Structures are given as structure tokens and as C-alpha cells.
Image (cartoon, helix red, strand yellow):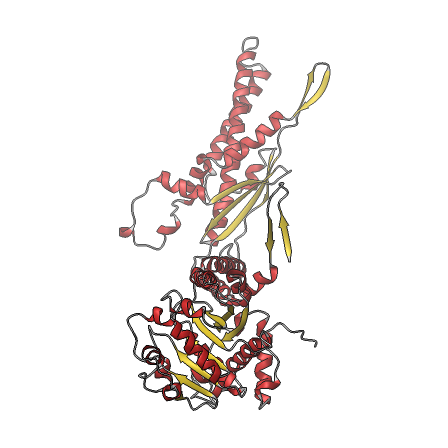
Amino acid sequence: MQEIQSNAAGSDVIEIDLRDIFHKLIKRRQTILSAAGICVVAALIYSFTAQPIYRATSRILVDAKPPKIMKIEQQVVTDFTDRTSFFNSQVEILNSRTVAEIVINELGKYEPWNRRGKPENQLKVITEGERIDFLKKRVKVSPVRMTQVIKVAVEDPDPVLASKIANGWVRAYVLFSSQDQLVQRRSELEADLTQQLKFLKEKHPVIVALKDEIAAINQKIAQKHQQRNESGNASELSNDITNIKVLDRAEVPLKPERPRKALNVILALVLGCFAGVGLVFLFESLDQTFKSAADMEAVLKLLCLVPIPRHDADKEHPEAVPEFVADRSRHSLMAEAFRSLRTGIIYSNPDLSKKTFVVTSAAPSEGKTTVAINLATVFAHADEKVILVDTDLRNPRLHKIFKVDRANGVIDILAFDKSDIHAFVHKTGIKGLDLLTCGEVPPNPSELLGSRKMEEFIATLSTMYDRIIFDTPPVLAATDAVVLSTKVNATILVVEAGTTHRHAAERSAEALRSVRARVLGAVLNRVNPDQQGPYYYYYHYGQNALKKSDHPFKLKNLFKKTDPNA
């Protein structure tokens, strides 16, 4: 158990049961596996159907001017402002539309990805500006941290074109920078020439030299215009610029940058597992039913007498329907559970004073009749004389299950004050177990069940039988069960795992407590053993042991947490 406690004074302690969380995850493992599987399949479909995208990368070195030495308040400091500004300016130039226009002019024509391979008549007309914008989105200019190196990465479905654009981008940048520096140098020379002509004549050697240098620069600028084509070499162009060097030309990529199939599958698996876990906790928070005995005990404040496993068809005993599983499939987990219930009742009542029982539930179809029949059966197997009384006057079923006539039952005995009870009792075919049907349903069943005649009837049965078990209506469906619970020794509340709503079970338990009914405990019915965490081991251990034993009483209680080392 791990506890998380707030530091604030007077705050509550929040407890997190890691074992409970683990059991919930194991119980709903199919949800996690399904979520992970869906994500992995989606990732595989995307990875194998998505268009491969290739990335080509060029790298250039931009060597800024040396930092200036400045004197501030008698202190000599280095000013890196110009250097940083220059480098940032180069990054902006590389991201500019001017460079993109030069590249598109070199390519001749650039088509966005979604327009390639389609007939011209199906394509929408786009402007050059839109082409430039699309191209710029596919080019990533990123400075390498703590260096003066800039990477130019280009993505494109065509690996050859990606490489061509990356190299063309660097070439266009170098060409632009080269022209810019030549124009700047020419402006400086022209200003110097104008100044010198004030003092020197046209044929003076200084004037001639300045004019020759200006002419040479003009010629170079003209040559740069001629070099705006695909065959231009950025390395050769950069030789004219002392502070820009092409470090790496973009090679044609051999493998696509994306989709990364293996990475996509791994990420999808991780994401799917997290999503599955999230769904588990979401479902658990929305699920207001009981899944375990501990959960039911915590909410209802009632002892779980036994968890009854759900009924699975017995191939060896196909006639063993749930109502008769304790008699016809004695080696089954379900039959052993009812024997455990009987054992728990006996040991909770050594003096055997508890002879009369009410079996009820919160709502219909939770298996209370099945529990009542099998509990009566296992008591009969223990050489006790047992009678099963149908007091579910709203929806009687015992006569249908045992295939007897409903008439002449408990209501007839009470209404007509019959004393010869033996004349109304049916034999069930199970040694030691008798049946008393409900008879004709009266208009006022609750009043009849709560009458003094009912008390006298129960007292008479107690002299004739060792155990009397009453099958009653659900607590929330009628008041019959609550009324009758005040006249018997013990009441058993049946709760169906995964079906009974918590609020319904709580209201039923409170209704029984309100009349001070002697509630022996609750039975968690139709439990899935594989979803019960610690119970899983005991169920399968018991199943193997039962197959090797001919006598059901040789086994210990499989549903209690015993010491495996004992």
C-alpha cells in the first residue's frame, strides 16, 4: 500500500491501493490490448500508405567580422553586437523570398506536392507567390548551436529534387551575398573616386587604378547574373566571399525521412497502452457495479459469505443447469462455492439456532432463486431435512423449475388455516429436500407474510425441518422480503457481479437494516474467477482438486484467502 498525504494541516489522507490498481488492469487487460492493437494497426496502415518524404541537407559556414574593441569608461571591452547581428542577418537572408525566387527561377518550374502527377485540366491555377510560399514551408534553415554553421534542410517526395533544391538554395544565398558585397565595394570605390578627382586629374595613376577596379567589379556583377542556373557551383561562388564557405553539399538521400515505420509502431504501441490504461480507469470510474468481494463489503458494510462463480456448461453433465448444479455437477467450482456457503453458515452458528433463512436480492434476475435452491440442496446433502418455500408472490418460479403444480401452497395454508402441511409438500427428487409452492397469489401478499399466522407457520415448519429457506421477491420490487426478514433467523442478500448497481444494493441493505433484520451477509453471484485477482489461483487449484476427489467435503474453503504454504 502506498500513501500520498497532503502537507496542508487538517487534510485527508489519500490511499492508493497498488494491488487493486494492478488487479483492475489485469481484469480489463483486453481493453488495453485492444487499444494498443488499434493504435499499432493504424500506425502500420499509415506507415505503409503514406507518401515517403526525403530530406536533403546542405551546410555552410558564415564567418562574421571580428568583434570591435570598444572603450567604455576607461575600460576596454569587446563588442559582439555587430558579429551577432551579421550572423542573424544571414539566417534571415536564407529564409527570404528573394532566395526562394532565385531557386524557383533556376528550377524553371516548381510544383507543390499535391499537384504532382495530376492532369493540368484538374489543377487549380496558382500564382508564383503561392509556389514560393509552399517551397519556403519545405525548407528549414537552422543555425547549429554554439557555432557559425547554418544547416539548410529540404524535404520533398522526390529525393533528387530535394537534393537539387538544397544545393540551389545555398547557391542562391551565396550568389546574393556575393553580389551584395560587390555592390557595396563598388559604392565605396565610387565615393573614393569622386573624392580623388577633386585633387587629381583623369590620367593620374590613382584615378586610373580606381576606374579599372570599378570596371572589374562591374564585370563580376554581370558574370554573377549569368551564373543563376543549375550548373552553378556554390563552392566556386563562395571563393569570391571570404566569410562564407560551403561545408557540405546536399547528397541525394537514399532513405526517406518519414514515415519511420519502426518508430511509428513503437510510439503507437506506447500510446495505445497509455490510452488503454486511461480507458480502464474511465470504465472503472463509470462502472457502478460490484466486481469483487472486497468492493462489495466496503460499500454494503456486509460480510461476503462467498463469491459464486458464473455457471459454465459442464460437458460431462449437460443436465446440470444452474439451479441444480450443486446436485448434478458436484465437482464443479459453482457446487463447491455453495458448499463453502453452507460451511460458513454452520460455523457462524455453532448452536444451530439459525434454522430459517430468507434469500433475496436488490433487483430481479440476480440469481436469488438459484442460490436458494442450491443452498437448500447442499444442506440436504449434509443429511439435514430441508424445505424450500416459494414466497416470491410477485413472480413465483420454484414450481416451474421443479415442474410441479403451483396450487395448494403456502398461501393456501395461511389463508385457510390449514394444519396438515404434509399434504401440501412436494418431493423434489433430491434426498432430504422438500418443496412448498406459493399457491394462489392473494391481493395483499405483504400483509399475509407479516401476519401472526405466518409466524405460527414458520414455528410449525421448524418442528418438522432442520432448515427452512424462503425464496422471496427482490427488496426494491416489493416489501415482502423486508417484512418476512423480521420473522426469520437470518437473511442472505444476493448481489450479481458486474450487474447490480451499487445504489440499488445499498438501498436494499439499508431497507433490511431499517427493520432490524438479522442480515447474515451477502453473496456475490456470477463472478468471473479470472477477474478476481487473488481468487484466480484458488479457483483453479480447487478445480483440479475436485476432479481428483469423489467426496465434496474433503476440500477446504476455496474462496477464502488461505495461506498457500499451509
- The N terminus sits in image quarter: bottom right
Residue 223 visible somewhere in the drawing: yes
Q: Residue furthest left?
A: 121
* Image position of 182 with respect to 264: above or below: above
Viewer-proximal residue, 22 or 71?
A: 22
Residue 297 % position (x, y): 54, 64
Residue 217 % position (x, y): 52, 27
Residue 228 % position (x, y): 46, 39
- Residue in the image at 59% along x and 89% along y: 549
- The C terminus sits in image quarter: bottom right
Viewer-proximal residue, 301 or 245?
A: 301
Viewer-proximal residue, 68 or 36?
A: 36
Residue 414 as seen in the image, left or right of residue 326: left
Residue 165 % position (x, y): 47, 46
* Image position of 189 with respect to 349: above or below: above
Q: Count numbered badges in the picture.
A: 0
* Image position of 281 with respect to 463: above or below: above
Viewer-proximal residue, 236 or 429?
A: 429
Residue 312 visible somewhere in the drawing: no
- Residue in the image at 50% along x and 43% along y: 140
> Residue 412 occupies which quadrant of the picture?
bottom left
* Image position of 138 with respect to 181: above or below: below
